Image (spheres, rainbow, N blue to C red):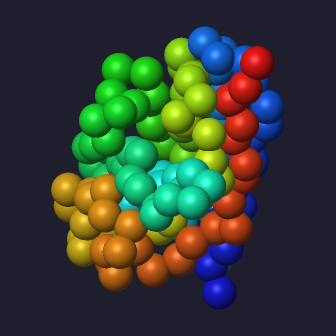
Amino acid sequence: QPQLVESGGGLVQPGGSLRLSCEVHGLSLEHFAIGWFRQAPGKGREGVSCVSTESRTNYGGSVKGRFTISRDNAKNTVYLQMNSLNAEDTGVYYCASGWGPDLPFCTLHPGDGRYTNWGQGTQVTVSS
């Protein structure tokens, strides 16, 4: 059973940076698209960013220009570099994997059933 493990969350001041990691176990990352999603308290889950097997990327409007997604297939890990963080970025961040050929252009829809495996999430809190 594939397993996705997020890490790198924490408490950061507004304007600060964090780098999240999504380490994938039980599958070869090179064949999978990865999406990052987040859920703020009292809100639904929203798409943040994703990267296809061909390294095509997609970003949500609120994070474009501030967040950068990258993948290291050799390390079976996808990263999300988050800069210029603000309070609206607070939430639990999840990564999800989907079979690459099913997601040639990865999507940011959290309800997209092509994302078949999800991690447990890592908390990001932006506060002074």
Instruction: Give the x, y percent position of residue 26.
Output: 65, 75
Whether residue 49 is visible, yes or no, is yes
Instruction: Give the x, y percent position of residue 25.
Output: 68, 68
| Residue at x 45%, y 36% (from the top left corner) | 69
| Residue at x 69%, y 41% (from the top left corner) | 124
Whether residue 35 is visible, yes or no, is no
Is 64 left or right of 104, judged from the image as shown?
right
Is 32 left or right of 12, judged from the image as shown?
left
Can you tell which quarter of the image residue 57 is in? top left
Can you tell which quarter of the image residue 109 is in? bottom left
- Residue 62 sits above or below residue 49 on the image: above
Seen from the viewer's position, the closer of residues 119 and 52 is 119
Disc tally is 0
Figure quadrant of the N terminus:
bottom right
Instruction: Give the x, y percent position of residue 33.
Output: 38, 60
Residue furthest to the top: 15
| Residue at x 41%, y 46% (from the top left corner) | 48
Instruction: Give the x, y percent position of residue 50.
Output: 37, 49
- Residue 95 sits above or below residue 78 on the image: below
Is 36 left or right of 107, judged from the image as shown?
right
Residue furthest to the front: 42
| Residue at x 79%, y 31% (from the top left corner) | 11
Figure quadrant of the C terminus:
top right
Is 51 left or right of 126, judged from the image as shown?
left
Seen from the viewer's position, the closer of residues 77 and 117 is 117
Residue furthest to the left: 105
Residue furthest to the bottom: 1
